[in-house]
Every structure is written in structure tokens, then in C-alpha cells.
Image (tube, rainbow, N blue to C red):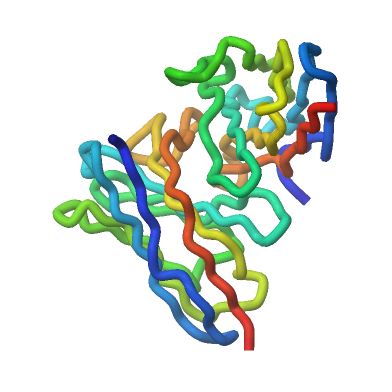
């Protein structure tokens, strides 16, 4: 059971917009701590996608965006492409656990 | 090019020990905190441990506290994870990742910007 809750899977057709939610609690996201997102392509290592709730590292397309409100955060992907098919993980910090915490991951399928 | 390369994985019997290494290049290793993260087969990411840039601050996940030891050698641009009392549930791919947000301690801003490709650990008799 992950501290941060993500839907196990989402799907969308090419060109569509999908969102992935990440729900936490008052000891992590709700405490105001940043949320970060990682993309893990099949058979590859995770890659930083969004940091500090809504910032994109250099080289990440602006089709990817992040937001945070209250105890939840979201990753939005617009103009869905076949190469976006991957697992996506949210990450934050938990002050009760004094630990980095991850969501359980969401598998994105491009139909 | 910024690069992290893990090594030292392999097959080990339950109760055994293993030492993982992570070689860093392309950035000033001594200025950054470092982390170990693992992924069990078919499962999600699990953060294991953090070490500050000067080794002054160290944190562990409860699942490995008392069994795993993180360390670093800034002169050798290397990060280590000494694993003992290994269990079947420790099987997985182990990643090292450089830290951002704070080089001194874990904080609400902490995240991991560069990841290695991972090394596989299998605990089985």
C-alpha cells in the first residue's frame, strides 16, 4: 500500500488529453511539500518528468504539465503520442515517515 | 554527459550480503545528495536511502533500516549500498539517483533528477 495513491491505469487515443491523479494526506502533499513526477518507459530506468509541482526539466515537451491542490496533484498529458506509453510515478516527502514517498504508479496505454 | 552507473548486483542466498556501487561522472558529485531506489519485479518504485553531500545526514526506509548501509566516497565519485541479512523480498532492480532540493538533508523539496540504469539483485536459495 503506497503512501501516495495513483490509479493503476489510464488510457487515451493519440492526440487526446489524459490526466493522472496522485492523492496524499496532511503529512505529505497536504503539508505543502512538492510533488514530482517520473516517467518509466518499458525496460528503462525512471526519468524525471516534472519537478516542484509544475516545472519541466530541459528537454521535456510542454505537452506534459503538473499541478497541485490541497492533498492531491495531477499530471496532464496533451496531444497523446504512442511514445508516451509508460508507467508514471508521483513522488513527495512525508514528514511523519521522514521519508521520500512514491505513488504506486500508473500505466498509461495509448490506444 | 551526466552519468550514473550501478554495479555489484547478482544472485545471493537469503541471509547473505551484497555491496552495490554507483559510479558518477559528468557532474560535481561531492556537491549533491544521493539516493538508492529499488523496484521489485512488476512492482513500483520504493525509496530506500538518502545520503547528504558530505555524508553528514543519512536516512533509511523502515524496510531496510538496520540491514542496509549507505555510504559515499567523494574522492572516488562513488556511492555504495551495503546490504546484509538479505531476504527474498529484497529482490529487484536497484537504482542510484542524484538528489535535488537540498544537499544537506531530506526536505519537502527533495527529488531525484538523474538516475542510473540499475543493477539487479536476486535473493534466492
- Residue found farthest to the bottom: B125
Rendered residue at 61%/49% (across/down): A43
Residue B70, how many percent across, how many down?
38, 61
Which quadrant of the structure image shows residue A36? top right
User: As displayed, is residue A59 above or below residue B110?
Assistant: above
* Residue B44 at x, y percent in the picture: 68, 49
Q: Tally the marks.
A: 0
Q: Residue at image x 72%, y 38%?
A: A4
Q: Position of residue B104 (x, y in %)?
A: 32, 39
Q: Where is residue B58 in the image (x, y as percent from the top left)?
A: 39, 53
Q: In this view, does B113 lie above or below B25?
A: above
Q: Which quarter of the image is occupied by the C terminus of chain B?
A: bottom right
Query: Along the horizontal axis of the image, is A75 left or right of B17?
Result: right
Please report the residue visible at 65 percent of the width from the left and 76 percent of the height from the top.
B88
Of B29 and B122, nearer the camera is B122
* Residue A83 position by quadrant: top right
Residue B32 is left or right of residue B11, and the answer is: left
Q: In which quarter of the image is the N terminus of chain B?
A: top left
Amino acid at each position: 500500500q503506497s503512501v501516495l495513491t495513483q490509479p493503476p491505469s489510464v488510457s487515451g487515443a493519440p492526440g487526446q488529453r489524459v490526466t493522472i491523479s496522485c492523492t496524499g494526506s496532511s503529512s505529505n502533499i497536504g503539508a505543502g511539500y512538492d510533488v514530482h513526477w517520473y516517467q518509466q518507459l518499458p525496460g528503462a530506468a525512471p526519468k524525471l518528468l516534472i519537478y516542484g509541482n509544475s516545472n519541466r526539466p530541459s528537454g521535456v515537451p510542454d505537452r506534459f504539465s503538473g499541478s497541485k491542490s490541497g492533498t492531491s496533484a495531477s499530471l496532464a498529458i496533451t496531444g497523446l503520442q504512442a511514445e508516451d506509453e509508460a508507467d508514471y510515478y508521483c513522488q513527495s516527502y512525508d514528514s511523519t515517515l521522514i521519508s521520500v514517498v512514491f505513488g504506486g504508479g500508473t500505466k498509461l496505454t495509448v490506444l | 554527459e551526466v552519468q550514473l552507473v550501478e554495479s555489484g548486483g547478482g544472485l545471493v542466498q537469503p541471509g547473505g550480503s551484497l555491496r552495490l556501487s554507483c559510479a558518477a561522472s559528468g557532474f560535481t558529485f561531492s556537491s549533491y545528495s544521493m539516493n538508492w531506489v529499488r523496484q521489485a519485479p512488476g512492482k513500483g518504485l520504493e525509496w530506500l536511502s538518502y545520503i547528504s553531500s558530505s555524508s553528514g545526514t543519512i536516512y533509511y526506509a523502515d524496510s531496510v533500516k538496520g540491514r542496509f548501509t549507505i555510504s559515499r566516497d567523494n574522492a572516488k565519485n562513488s556511492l555504495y549500498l551495503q546490504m546484509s541479512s538479505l531476504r527474498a523480498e529484497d529482490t529487484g532492480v536497484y537504482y542510484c539517483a542524484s538528489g535535488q532540493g537540498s544537499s544537506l538533508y531530506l526536505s519537502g523539496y527533495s527529488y531525484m533528477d538523474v538516475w542510473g540504469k540499475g543493477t539487479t539483485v536476486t535473493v534466492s536459495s
